[in-house]
Image (spheres, rainbow, N blue to C red):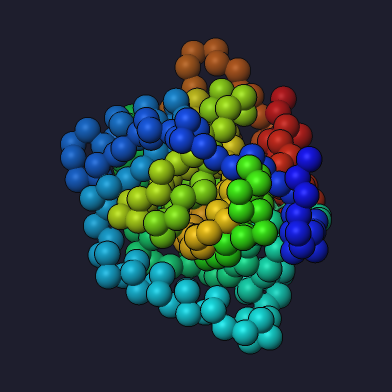
Amino acid sequence: MVVLANPSVVDQIPLLPSPGHRDTFAAVPVVDLSRPGAARAIVDACERFGFFKVINHGVATATMDRAESETVKFFAQAQAVKDRAGPAYPPFGYGSKRIGLNGDMGWLEFLLLAYVAAVRGVAVRVLEKMAEGLGIAPVDALSAMVTEQGSDQVFRVNHYPPCPALQGLGCSATGFGEHTDPQLISVLRSNGTSGLQIALRDGAQWVSVPSDRDAFFVNVGDSLQVLTNGRFKSVKHRVVTSSLKSRVSFIYFAGPSLAQRIVPLPELLGDGEEILYKEFTWGEYKKAAYKTRLGDNRLAQFEK
Ligand code: GA4
């Protein structure tokens, strides 16, 4: 049993085992966006893990560094000042510890914003390469869902402060509990503090993703799993807080317009292949998602 000197600090925050060296996911697939093999490599990673890392993405380091330093400045302000930028629900602004609308709690504070152009560019290029790799035409078959007017994009800035109360106890505060993202893809960039973990083998094993502040990490969301009729996997992930270092992450969630039908793309269905999901629009899925708890299997209610 863990005995805390000051239990009120992490009251209501679920705990997780602290990651050890043996949990490191050394084999994160790396996609070099500037190379001809990128399309194939993306499809392969989405089928195997629903997760990969993108390098040579064309976003200037200075752009990301500036975003990071502004973020650090914002979160360093007095609580009362930050609270003036809230609440985060509905639908954008500053939030602290409360995730979603149904009682999930994490050791983090965050900003939900409309969107940021440079990171969206990475998402668009990844989706174009993905269409190419899947052999579907036109080249913007997937990316148009994100670039069209009315697409539902969210940019999230997360700050996971260190949680010194748990230092040396073998457990860590849950920063963001396990979940899948509802959108098509999510594109994440973090500072040099690790903490992101992804589930392998349907959640039987959790592995830590080594941080890389020069790369973007991409994960497949529920909507893309449906568009590919289950061929790509919406990857379960979570964030474990460090006891010593603060983690800052930026995530762009590429969602389509609310009216977009989310159904398997006909070109991807093999002869006689069964469609695994009931038809729904992104608007319907988003509404259903906000009625769930973070760790729920949100797609289950849409399975045939
Ligand atoms: C996960 C992905 C994005 O961060 C997010 C999250 C949203 C929130 O934090 O408000 C959700 C979560 C996310 C999944 C299910 C619902 C909605 C909290 C929650 C319990 C902004 C999103 O779009 O879905």
145 up-or-down from 135: above or below: below
Q: Residue 163: give x, y in percent of width and height.
A: 62, 60
Q: Residue 104: give x, y in percent of width and height.
A: 76, 54
135 up-or-down from 57: above or below: above
- Give me the residue at 46% from left, 35% from top: 21
Q: Quadrant of the C terminus?
A: top right
23, 204: nearer the viewer = 23
- Give me the residue at 77% from left, 62% from top: 6
75, 181: nearer the viewer = 75
Q: Is 211 situated left or right of 294 in this image?
A: left
Q: Residue 239: give x, y in percent of width and height.
A: 58, 49
Number of marks in picture: 0
- Give me the residue at 46% from left, 50% from top: 194
Residue 177 visible, this orientation? no
103, 232: nearer the viewer = 103
Can you tell me which quadrant of the image ligand 1 is in?
Answer: bottom right
Residue 171 visible, this orientation? yes
Q: Quadrant of the N terminus?
A: top right
- Give me the residue at 51% from left, 46% from top: 196
Q: Quadrant of residue 136?
A: top left
89 up-or-down from 282: above or below: below
